[in-house]
């Protein structure tokens, strides 16, 4: 038996992605910057993918910059915007529940002398738009917040926060890490009032090693790297045409099924929530109105690491939180009001449309067995 319930960490590349990558490897292997026919054919595949991803975001294709993934996109957005706009305005704002790559980018800004303000959820574990907006002042150059939290599935009030900030402080650049929302929830830079927005390939059935950054027209960024003319000089280096082509194909394949997939996985999440709620010692931690794709829960008396090994032996793949933490606690759960002992026994299930009701049943059966063998018989 093999049950994969860790799609927030990565997804299996889809057939559309594999076919596009294979075709690009065989036929589009040229350098997109070359001016001959072989280079032009490679460039055509890159342009097609850019258009496919832009269509999924509802934005102009010229606004997309290809990168190696979400971490690079987040750093280019955050550090690039701070370098461009932070000469006189030295305050930057984010939240305490961001992905490690965003936290790391702001750590670097703090080392450079920026005033970094990290807005925390309230005592009830809810992050409020008015608190984010209140942290912004005339000395602020940048705000960054994620759309969907990768550990709990909580949907952050990006649209409301960015709209409030835009009305009061139009000079502030607004960045959204939309990695866990893209092609899972409706995501539009314009509707989110985002100047910069990050997406990633391997979360949406494309391959690892490719991502994109939306850059609103007129927004300036200082590139992290200096080199060639690629990607409007914001990301120099020869583009990986196969990875980009696969990303575009995956976006095109998923774009038309967003609502249907969300409804389907929402049903799986609801079924799992119902079964977990009936189990003694199990506490569901994700908000009811969170992403349908992610569910976080704790199992009293069993450490996450113990459970991960037990479930893995059963052929069931889940995680204890962010894959980037390599099994270590990131501290994000506590920021949402989850107590340390519960955080230490937390598991995260994340769905995709390939999952089935039988996967949910298999997980719950294994959890009951783990409780019986590892808790009750101690």
Image (cartoon, helix red, strand yellow):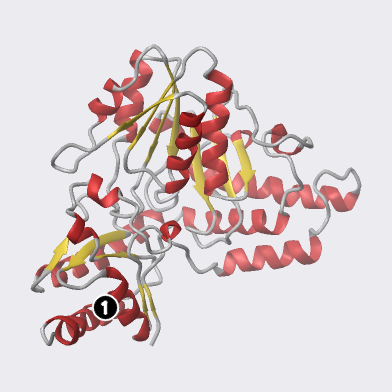
Viewport quadrant of the C terminus: bottom left
Nearest the eye: 252 or 306: 306
Q: Position of residue 377 (x, y in %)?
A: 12, 87
Please tell me in which quadrant of the rendered image residue 30 appears.
Answer: bottom right
Residue at 43% x, 37% y is 176
Side (left or right) of 157 relative to 254: left
Nearest the eye: 123 or 154: 123
Residue at 64% x, 35% y is 224
**Residue 188 visible here:** no
**Residue 274 visible here:** yes
Q: Which residue is mark 1?
A: 363
Residue at 53% x, 34% y is 77
Q: Is residue 315 above or below residue 193?
A: below
| Callout 1: SS | helix
Viewport quadrant of the N terminus: bottom left
Side (left or right) of 177 relative to 337: right
Q: Position of residue 3 (x, y in %)?
A: 37, 79
Q: Position of residue 85 (x, y in %)?
A: 54, 19
């Amino acid at each position: 038996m093999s049950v994969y319930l860790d799609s927030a960490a990565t997804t299996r590349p889809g057939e559309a992605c594999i076919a596009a990558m294979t075709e690009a490897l065989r036929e589009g292997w040229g350098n997109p910057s070359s001016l001959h026919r072989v280079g032009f054919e490679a460039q055509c595949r890159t342009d097609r993918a850019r258009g496919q991803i832009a269509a999924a975001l509802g934005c102009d294709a010229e606004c997309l910059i290809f990168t190696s993934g979400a971490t690079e996109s987040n750093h280019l957005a955050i550090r690039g915007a701070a370098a461009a706009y932070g000469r006189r305005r030295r305050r930057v704002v984010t939240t305490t529940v961001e992905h490690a790559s965003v936290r790391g980018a702001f750590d670097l800004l703090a080392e450079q002398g920026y005033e970094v303000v990290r807005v925390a959820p309230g005592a009830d574990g809810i992050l409020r738009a008015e608190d984010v907006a209140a942290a912004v002042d005339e000395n602020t150059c940048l705000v960054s917040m994620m759309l969907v939290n990768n550990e709990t599935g909580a949907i952050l009030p990006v649209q409301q926060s960015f709209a409030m900030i835009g009305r009061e402080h139009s000079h502030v650049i607004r960045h959204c890490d939309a990695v866990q929302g893209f092609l899972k929830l409706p995501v539009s830079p314009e509707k989110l009032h985002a100047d910069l927005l990050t997406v990633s390939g391997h979360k949406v059935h494309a391959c690892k090693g490719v991502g994109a950054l939306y850059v609103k027209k007129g927004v300036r960024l200082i590139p992290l790297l200096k080199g060639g003319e690629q990607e409007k000089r914001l990301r120099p280096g020869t583009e990986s045409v196969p990875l980009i082509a696969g990303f575009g194909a995956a976006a095109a394949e998923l774009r038309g099924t967003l609502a249907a997939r969300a409804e389907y996985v929402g049903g799986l999440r609801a079924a799992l929530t119902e079964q977990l709620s009936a189990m003694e010692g199990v506490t569901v931690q994700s908000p009811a109105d969170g992403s349908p794709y992610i569910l976080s829960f704790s199992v009293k008396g069993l450490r996450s690491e113990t459970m991960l090994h037990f479930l893995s032996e059963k052929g069931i793949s889940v995680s204890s939180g962010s894959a980037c933490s390599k099994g270590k606690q990131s501290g994000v759960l506590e920021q949402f009001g989850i107590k340390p002992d519960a955080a230490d026994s937390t598991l995260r299930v994340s769905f995709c449309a390939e999952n089935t009701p039988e996967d949910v049943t298999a997980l719950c059966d294994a959890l009951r067995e783990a409780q019986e063998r590892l808790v009750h018989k101690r």
